[in-house]
Structure formats: C-alpha cells, structure tokens
Image (cartoon, coloured by chain):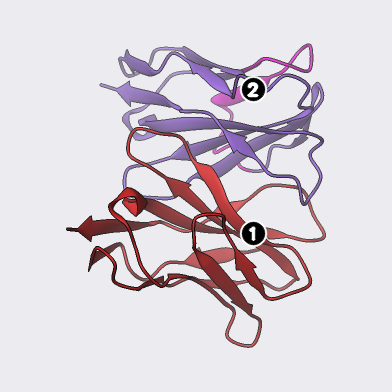
Amino acid sequence: AQSVTQLDSQVPVFEEAPVELRCNYSSSVSVYLFWYVQYPNQGLQLLLKYLSGSTLVKSINGFEAEFNKSQTSFHLRKPSVHISDTAEYFCAVSARGSASKIIFGSGTRLSIRP
Amino acid sequence: GAGVSQTPSNKVTEKGKYVELRCDPISGHTALYWYRQSLGQGPEFLIYFQGTGAADDSGLPNDRFFAVRPEGSVSTLKIQRTERGDSAVYLCASSPAGGKTDTQYFGPGTRLTVL
C-alpha cells in the first residue's frame, strides 16, 4: 500500500518570496508521483507529474518538483510566488504495477501575502 | 470542450435517507473514478470504472455504497441509509483510457451534508 505525508497544513509566504511545499511518500513498490492544485472555488487540476526519466519535473507556471528516491520525497518549489498561486496543493502517488487509483496527501494551503 | 460535470453541486439529506450523485465524464473518456474528500483531508479513492465495469472497488467503505456506469459514460454513486459520517465532497474524475500514466481530470464535486 502507498501513503503520502504533507507535513505542513498551511504555508504563508509573501509575494515574490520562494516557497517549498514538502511531500514524503511510503510505498513497497515503484510509484508515479503527482502534485494537484485546487484554486479557490475550482476543481482539482494536475500541476505536474513524475513518471520516469529526469527526476526534475516542471509546470507551465513556474513550479518544479524533484523526485528523490533515497529520501522518498517529492517536494514542490517555486522561486518567486504570485498572489494567483494562492490555492491548496495536494501531493499524490500511484503504484506503477497496479490500477490507476491515486492516493492523496492531506493537502497544504498556500496563502500569499502582498 | 466541456469538462467533467457533477450534479447536484450540493445535496442536503437526513440520516437514513438514500441519495444518488451523478457524474458526466469528458466525452470519449473510458475511465471514470470516484473519490471522497472529507473536511481537511485529501481525496480518498472509492471506485474506478473501465468502460461499464468496476475495475477496482476496493475503496468503497461498506455495502451502503454502490456505483454504476451502465452505458460506459455517465456514472451514478448511490448511498443507502446515509449516516452523518458520509458528509463530504464527492469528486468524480475521468481519463482517456485508464492507463497508469493517464491524467485524471476532476469535476467540481458534490457536497453532501447528512443531518
């Protein structure tokens, strides 16, 4: 079975500051890793995903995450945040060898202060 | 094009009643998923359909929960004898083929409140 831990339930940062949202996972098999984002009053959207190959993956809006197998982590980072990044971010995992269900973490609420 | 839609957006019911929640996936998507999101938690997997059949129903909490997808498109999640603990946002997602690397596209959810 897989599990995901997001240690920070809330992260407040100032606009244009860097941010890191932490994610650790547990699994006995190889996994795919995801970050989903939920903007206020909107549905969940895929932000980025790691399937294979380069361990550093990037989104179109400046976020990036690095798969670290030895530390079982997939932290999300952005060097300079914008007010529009205010949202809840969910780290998630699915097992490579089984069905397509996704296991989600409990989420991190990112709030940006002007 | 249209995304995943769910109806109703909000449902308030009394303990013990029966409810149905509907999901319309993106046209052409063969895979459909139901998740449940309780307050302060991430989505929790319930069931996955590939076409008309349930490929994985391991997340359904008990036999009060049942889901169907008779024609391989619209799906209905049915909850019998609702309990207060069933209160949550029920999310539906679809993907093109249900492959392990396919992106799942989520609907806006149905907020169920059991009084």
- The residue where tag 1 is placed is A49
Q: Is residue B71 magenta?
A: yes
Task: Please provide the residue range marked out in magenta.
Answer: B59-76
Q: Kindly indicate whether the residue at mark 1 contacts the one at mark 2 (C-beta within 8 angstroms).
A: no
**Is any part of residue B21 visible from this angle?**
yes
In the rendered image, which quarter is residue A30 located in? bottom right
Q: From the top left corner, tell me how far across and down residue A109 is, in percent.
A: 31, 56
Q: Main secondary structure of the magenta part?
A: loop
Q: Image point 59% across, 29% down: which residue?
A: B63
Quarter-wise, where is residue A66 in the image?
bottom right
Lateral position of residue A48 relative to residue B84, left or right: right
The chain holding disc 1 is A
Residue A106 falls in which quadrant of the image? bottom left
Q: Which mark is residue B81?
A: none
Residue B79 visible in the displayed image: no
Horizontal arrangement in the rendering, residue A17 relative to residue A49 (left or right): left
Q: Which chain is purple?
A: B
Tag 2, which chain? B
Residue at (64%, 20%) from the top-left corner? B1
Which residue, given by chain and number where applicable, does mark 2 sit on?
A: B67
The residue that appears at 73% across and 47% down in the rendered structure is A100
Instruction: Work out whether residue B70 or residue A12 is closer to the camera in this orientation and state it.
Output: A12
Chain in red?
A
Residue appearing at x 78%, y 61% in the figure: A96
Judge depth for marks 2 and 1 and give the one in front: 1
**What amino acid is labelled 1 in the image?**
Lys
Residue sitting farthest toward the left: A114
| Residue A21, horizontal then vertical, whole percent | 40, 69
Amino acid type, callout 2? Ala
- Residue A6, given in percent of the width and then of the height, sits at 42, 67
Q: Determine whether, in the image, residue A27 is placed left or right of residue A110.
A: right
